[in-house]
Image (cartoon, rainbow, N blue to C red):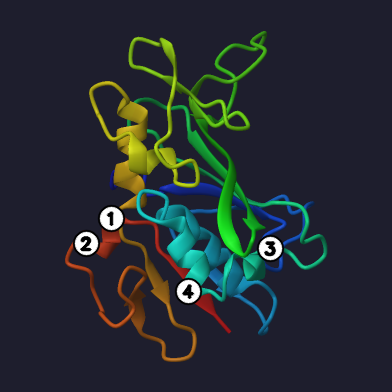
Amino acid sequence: MPEPTNPVLIHHLAPKNFLSFGPDNAGIDLKALNLFIGPNGCGKSNLIEAVSLMRSAPKEMRDVTRKGGGVAEWIWKGDPREPASVEWTVRNSQGSMLLRHYVAFRSVGQSFSLVDERIEDSELKLADASDVDFYYRYQQGRPLLNTIDRRKVKVLLTEADRSILVQRRDPEAYPELAWWLKITKGCEFIENGHSGRMRCSVNPRRRTCGMTPWKRISPILASS
């Protein structure tokens, strides 16, 4: 988890065609402490929903969308035929290069359908490189994993609509995936703007999770 000298965990968050965010949303840079202030309906809660969806990748993303009214309700009404996507970049325990996780989904027969997923470096390591290093790419149903010895291995997904974080957890072979799993299982605390109490996003009825001290995590605060 974040070191005390570098408390920023989530560096950038970019939902597109997602809830109230259209396809041209550039996203938002995040710091160690983030306070969202604005009138009702401006998108504060939707940013938090984007974090909730990404945190659910090691479990069931479809459960998050189901509780939110069904997957169709999570896709921007301006173009519901296009998939919704969320991308975030986070700190990397393996080095200074940030990691990027991207997921895209659509509604197929009112069910959650994962259409793309990528876990990769956020930037080119060499200026003349043609692509960033990646650890997993869904590739329109032809997924590839990059192992610790940098062999690209075709993956037979047991369930194509579930994140790779559910299906591959071996830290020896896939250290970046294991690190991402550790990140997404972390516990952020979200300020309830109406009651003013700090809530746990894993279990909103509890004041604390008992998993990780909240000061070690980048909190995201939202207030009306």
- Type of amino acid under label 1: Arg
Q: Secondary structure at mark 1?
A: helix
Dot 1 or dot 3, earlier in sequence:
3
Q: Which mark identifies residue 63?
A: none
Q: Residue furthest front?
A: 109
Q: Earlier in the sequence, mark 1 or mark 4?
A: 4
> Which of the two labelled residues, at mark 4 and mark 2, occupies the earlier sequence position?
4
Mark 1 vs 4: CB contact within 8 A: no
- 190 on left or right of 34: left
Q: Which residue is mark 1?
A: 216
Q: Tag 3: residue type?
A: Ile
Residue at the image position 56 percent from the left and 45 percent from the top: 103
Q: Secondary structure at mark 2?
A: loop
Horizontal and vertical percent position of residue 177: 36, 33
Q: Estimate the x, y position of residue 101 in percent, counting from the top left.
A: 51, 40
Gap between marks 1 and 3 measured at Cα: 32 Å
Quarter of the rendering containing residue 209: bottom left
Which residue sits furthest bottom?
A: 195
| Disc nearest the viewer among 1 and 3 | 3
Mark before the other along the chain sequence, 3 or 4: 4
Residue 175 visible to the viewer: yes
Q: Secondary structure at mark 3?
A: loop
Number of the label disc, if any, that sits on residue 67: 4
Badge 1 crowding class, 10 Å Cα cut-off, few under 14, some 14 to 19, many 20 or more, is: some
Type of residue at label 4?
Lys
Residue under circle 3? 75
Tell me the quarter of the image containing the C terminus: bottom right
